[in-house]
Amino acid sequence: MEDLGIKIIGALLTVVLAFTVGMTYGGIVRKLTARVQNRRGPVVWQNFLDLLKLQSKKTNVAHGFMGHMAPVWIIIAAGTVLMFIPILNGDLWFPNLTFHGDLIFLLYMMVFGSLGMALGAGQTGNPNSAIGVTRGLSQMVGFEIPFVLALVALMIQYKTTSIQDIMAIQAETGVWMMFSNPFAFLAALFASLGMFRYSPFDIVGAPAELASGPMSEFGGKYLGTMMTGGSIFAFIKLTLYVDLFMGGAGFGTGFIATIIGLGILLLKTFSLYMVPVFYGWISPRYRTEQAIRYFWGWPTALGVIAVIWAIF
Amino acid sequence: MNSFFLILLILFAGAGLSFALGKISSIISGTVAFLSIAAASALFFTQIEMGSFIEFSLGGIQLQWGINSYGYLFGIIVLGLGTLASLYSISYMQNKERTGGFYFNYVLVIAGMTGIIFSNDFVSFFIFWEIMTWASYLIIIYSGKNVKKIGIKYMIFSAVGAYSMLTAIVMIKGTYDTFLISEAINSGAFNFVDNIYIPILLLIGFGVKAATMPLHVWAPGAYNNAPTSFTVIFSGAMSKMGVLGMGLVLGHIFTVDRSGNLINFFSQFSVIALQQTIMWLGGITAVIGTLYALIQDDAKKLLAYSSIAQLGYITVGLATGTKLGVMAALFLAVVHGIFKGALFMVVGAVERQAGTTDMTKISGLIRKMPYTFLTALISIIALAGIPPLGGFVGKWMLYEALITESNSYFLVIVIFFSSTAAFLYSYRFLFGLFLGQEEKETEHVKEAPITMVIPMLILAVLLVITGAFPGLIFAPIAQAMEFIGFKDVTWNMSVLNNVWGNEMNLTYLGITIAVVFASIFAFLTLKGLKGTRYIGTKDISTSGEIPYDNENLTFQIDFFQPFVRAAAPMYKRSMDKIWNELGNGLEALFNFTRKIYTGNGQTYALFVVVFLVLLLLLKDTLFI
Amino acid sequence: MTSNNNDKQTIVEYIKNWSRKHSLFVMAYGTGCGAIEIPATMTSRYDAERFGIRGAATPRQADVLLITGYLATKTLKRVIRVYEQMQDPKYVIAFGSCTINGGMYYDSYNTINALDRYIPVDVYINGCMPRPEAVISGFVQLQKQIAEGNADNGTKYKENLEWYRTNQTKIIKNWRMPDYNW
């Protein structure tokens, strides 16, 4: 029972951590974007203020039951995936409910949230939402191909499909996956550009495109919950990348070590996050078919080379 | 009387009786059909003992009917789905004509499939196979539309498959002098080392039914043309007969060589070549099915193409030949039967209530048909392979088998591409029929009658259960696999394993999802409960405009235009064109032969006279 | 326009108002010629984002409606529809002299003279057109009103719906609106 109690507390702590870090990263990125554009920009905790305001709206409008369920599904997807990714290496304070979290399961669970939002956006009856959803789904087919190629390359090379095993191998050999299979890392990096929906792949949710596409009819608490889900997902994807390619984060057991481990995690995830953000500052927006063709070009070729590299 | 005889007798009698009663009323005819199928399945599930068989001789040939664990697995699908589908069909065919003929063929199809399961020897296998094919042909052309294009195409492909099967059977009789399946296998009939032709011929025959590329071109038209309550078992159960055959043949090829011979290099190479060919054919089938499903505007045709794609996955799984792969394939076969059956039932319910399945003409039915939508939602989640439902279990095992045990890593990418693109047409199905704008034309639509809703909900509940406790289906699958020749098939109730030692615990997954769902749903509903209001689909933000009633706010046409534009090169090639060109070429050849074989009686008489004259003239040189 | 103001708000109300005032989503709906000052306010030189002000694409996501200048009667009908589609609590900021007393078009047959008769307004910004500094001071004034708890005009609209409707239907001839479905 005690074990279960610690696990539950750990799970709650993980959720709080993901939420806080995700929203703060969003705020930091807004501030940095502003500085690049030679202006002051909002405060770093702006996303929290947005969330509080949205949750304190007095009336909320929904178009039906699926519209009400859409944010629920996103949070389910985010929460479940969060439970199955190891945050820190072998640590007491953030034990997840996972037992050998599996990569294939994660791939499919991440789609669960998008499906929920797509269904909710579909029920509103706004044609803009539907067009936005089709663009989003088509783009997803685009970037999933190099991502899966990279993951399959990793799985073949080390004969395991569990994230914890890959982290253990990196700890053993002392070499990050980034260097032992660089093509996989590059392919996955290109795929991450599509995942984080910054320019040039932000056609799905940009306010100027079709009145913000799928989210055009969501307001108040629904919009707030979706923003939370989006931030948690950003954190999840970054942690997944760090675990797979950059050796995870961990410093040992004990309270001080946990804090140091968290600091290392934040450092690594933030530096990885800067790649799509940097690229986004200087890019215009791609149309959907251009985006799909882009992903099926060089990133897929890199993924194929990664698989061949892994076989030999 | 022996239960095998009894079951088949009930089915045949039911067929005849419903035909006779069809003149009175369609509901009575349908009820008789349903009762006979229900009685047959009740007998099947209770009275049959595994491993029992009866023998009798018919016209000098020794026939043997029995049941083994492999057939039992498919019997569950056939009779279970058949019962639910016939219950569904009572209301579906309510106001149509010639229902006597329809139900006659319907029960005959189920009888044919049950007979296939009972057959322990090749002759009765072939007889029941042909009964099934002919009865289904008659139903496909039931509506009288497109007889030439679709019906004849189906007949040609089925005939080609059936005759190649017959050739294989005759060859087996000639080489091994037996018609019994188990004896033939034990003597090495499926040994790819010695006989190359027998397995390939059999695979062609089964591949037609299981819609493997390049033999899949009959499927979209046939699934679409048949009345929907037949398509439920057409796609759910009949295609599994092809899977049954393929599993039998491939299972015996890829497991340990039964006679214990050493496999030399040539035989190993040919076996590997066969395996890779079938795997890649399955993969390409999956991709083709998905790509064409994306661009369909008709919900039934979309599901037809999607069936082809899912059967491609099953073929790939069977061809891997390892324990995990074949288990994945058989599990996917069972789950596919359940969710495709449910989806076709949904389409049939919509067709009956709203009049058409064309997604450009109707939409927004979610408020009017909530139970139908619930079934569709659960079935689509299972089709897309999203956790925690049953489709994910099958897909997980398939991917693990491909990555860990076979060497075709690029096939994983092809399958994954098809699986991701499956999300697209899954969303299209749900959005096209149920979500979107509510139009005036569909205002009169009401929920489907109770005899249609109950089978749908039963199937949906089954999907949820198999997602959490797949072990319930693993039990018969393990027994079936042991019959084919695998040894020590292990399984768990809720934990999936692969050979590298990774596991996937479904109980934890289920609990996590339930807890998160409960908490966030409670939070979202209770927060600001008083201020939440629900509005209709006309109250959308159209830049302040108030749309007139005749203004079109529906988005259904050219739904996936960006994807189709990006993947345009993949759509240019079509298997249909290749077959059509082959047909045209053959016709040109036959036109040439027509010059001699004119079909005119006087020309033949002339030929006979000319031949006699030549004989008389040359009799000295020819007959010394 | 003042509503009941109790000088002491509860802690919860205080936090809510603090978050509302520091995060304003502006409906990007330029209705008149004053709209040309909006891009200048939002971009780098006069940066409105440091106050938490952001553009929102649809009325469902927005808090603040900017009426930027004169309103033709045609536009007024759409503006009323947009205002009713927004969710409480919502604020209206009126730019320019045209919304106060008709401005340059005070004797036109086609425009309205006083916006306050048709939808409730929180803050007027004077000028023709107001410069970005004036716009920002208007937003700061709105923030002050929110902090004091004075900015609940959405409820006021609900309560005096008949009065507003009478005024609106008097001036808009082809009134074809769906019922306001609270």
Image (cartoon, coloured by chain):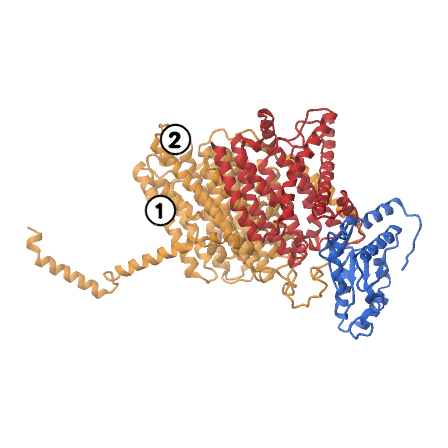
Chain colours: A red, B orange, C blue
Residue B150 position by quadrant = bottom left
Rendered position, B291 above or below B500 = below
Q: Residues within 10 Å of mark 1 (few under 14, many from 20)?
A: many
Report the Cα–Cα distance between label 2 and label 1: 25 Å
Secondary structure of residue under mark 1: helix
Q: Residues within 10 Å of mark 2 (few under 14, many from 20)?
A: some
- As drawn, the label of residue A272 is none
Q: Position of residue A162 (x, y in %)?
A: 59, 32
Which residue type does callout 2 highlight? Asp
- Name the one closer to the observer, C16 or B141: C16
Q: Position of residue A193 (x, y in %)?
A: 60, 44
Q: Is residue A211 visible?
A: yes
Which residue sits at x=44%, y=41%?
B279
User: Label 2: which residue?
Assistant: B257
User: Label 1: which residue?
Assistant: B164
- Name the one closer to the observer, A300 or B128: A300
Rendered position, B448 above or below B322 = below
Q: Is residue B83 visible?
A: no
Looking at marks 2 and 1 on the same chain, the residue that comes earlier in the sequence is marked by: 1
Secondary structure of residue under mark 2: loop
